[in-house]
Image: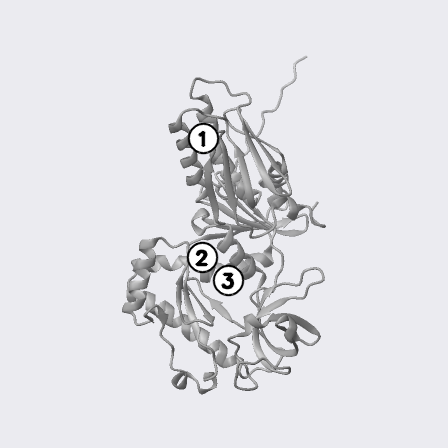
Amino acid sequence: MSRKIAEKTAVTISEEEVAIRKTDEGKLIFTQYHEKNCVLLLKGDKLTVAAFPEESRVGAIYLAKVANVVKNINACFVEIQPGEICFLSLKDAQFPFLLNRVFDGRILEGDELIVQVTRDAQKTKQPSVTAHISLSSDYFALAFGSTRVGFSTKLATDEKKMLEKMLKEAGIIEGGCLVRPDYDILSPNLSGMPSFGLIVRTKAAELTASGTEQLAEHFRHFLDEYITFFQNAVHRTCFSCLKKTGLIDNIMAGILNNLVSADEFSELLTDNPLMYTQLEEYKTVHLPDKGLRLYEDSLLSLSKLYSLDSRIEAALGEHVWLKSGGYLMIQPTEALTVIDVNSGKFEGRKDAFLKVNLEAAEEISRQIRLRNLSGIIIVDFINMKEEESRTEVMDCLKKNVRRDRVKTVVVDMTPLGLVEITRKKITKPLREALAEPGIR
């Protein structure tokens, strides 16, 4: 007896679902992973960055009162809120903005001054603050102290020269210093305000194409905001919080300054409605050309959609397989991280080792960034006798690590094929972040 088998219904995927799954142009994903905030960069279907930012007050500004001065450690302790004491080194209080008296070179008990949080409380250590206040925009930063003008080290030489020329033409800088505003005209209340200098940020390079007038307009608008901030501060009471650090502002500042470049993604994606609202506000001001999407599928979570569990699990494993059949062995130790390149299943002609090493060089740069490795990293490439091949591998490695926002230096290759890499520590490596309570 035959039985008719019903035809399977074709599964259709909507254009929106296709757009969500597609990561060719890069997606910056904000979600929760094991009940902790997580930011991921997916590009070309590869997980490139995985960060677990913590809530922080770094950057917040308070009107504080000096509780006591301890001369033998060249520091003082200030109260930023009733009962909350912070550490202030007197080296970070050489240019304070006092509100109760004119600064005479001394910090005294009972002084009221504006401070900015530089480090959150850590275990038994109190938060640290500085009296050298700085505020920043997308293009510039202004900070108490020197009147000198500095440029981001990430700016190319020609970009720096062009920006410096435009700032001079606009009358903003002169002789390498910021032209000081006339406080008597702006506000008599700011007559005791310390001098401040200018830092030109990396993104300011975008303004070179717009011309001097556009650059000057952005700077003067930012300067007006800076002056207004301190004008308002002098009328506030002690222990007031003058500037908070919002969760998204804090996360995005850390991510975009240290881990991800804005040209690496085209869309922001989140499954958290509250975070979506905050991202919308941030995007409008800082990333107007980027897309933003709220993921709301109750049947398939964002974590499942992108297989985050398996991707992150792979980012913790020692073995990383290469398409060629070769593989990497990544082993972190207390002093350094060792990466060993193996040919594995790969079989080829005379240039086989070169192909494996070139593929490994590209993957190593991604793994260093994804795992957030820092300090000394030693890579043991497959030994190659030809100098041309060795040079090609080194050039490939240097080219790929340039994509990393964290300062990474490829030192050299030894005759045995060992390459030394150094990478600045910005945040905890991924394996440490995932080892914290509440994540695993």
In the image, what residue type sits under mark 1? Leu
Residue closest to the eye, 311 or 351:
351
Is tag 3's residue or tag 1's residue first in the polypeptide sequence?
3
Within 10 Å of the Cα at label 3, are there few (<14), some (14-19), or many (20+) other Cα atoms? some
Q: Mark 3 or mark 1: which is in front? A: 1
Circle 2 SS class: loop
Asked if residue 161 can be seen in this view, the reply is yes
* In the image, residue 199 above or below residue 384: below
Residue placed most toward the observer, 392 or 287: 392
Q: CA distance from mark 3 to mark 1?
A: 42 Å
The kind of secondary structure element at disc 1 is: helix
Q: Residue at x 42, y 30 (%)?
A: 390
Tell me where residue 192 appears, x and y as whole percent: 48, 83
Task: Name the residue that disc number 2 marks.
Answer: 287
The amino acid on which the numbered mark 2 sits, given as a three-letter code, is Leu
Report how far apart the C-alphas of labels 2 and 3 lie in the structure. 10 Å
Q: Earlier in the sequence, mark 1 or mark 2?
A: 2
Instruction: Give x and y (percent) for residue 276.
Output: 55, 56
Taking the image as shown, residue 23 lies to the left or right of residue 125, namely left
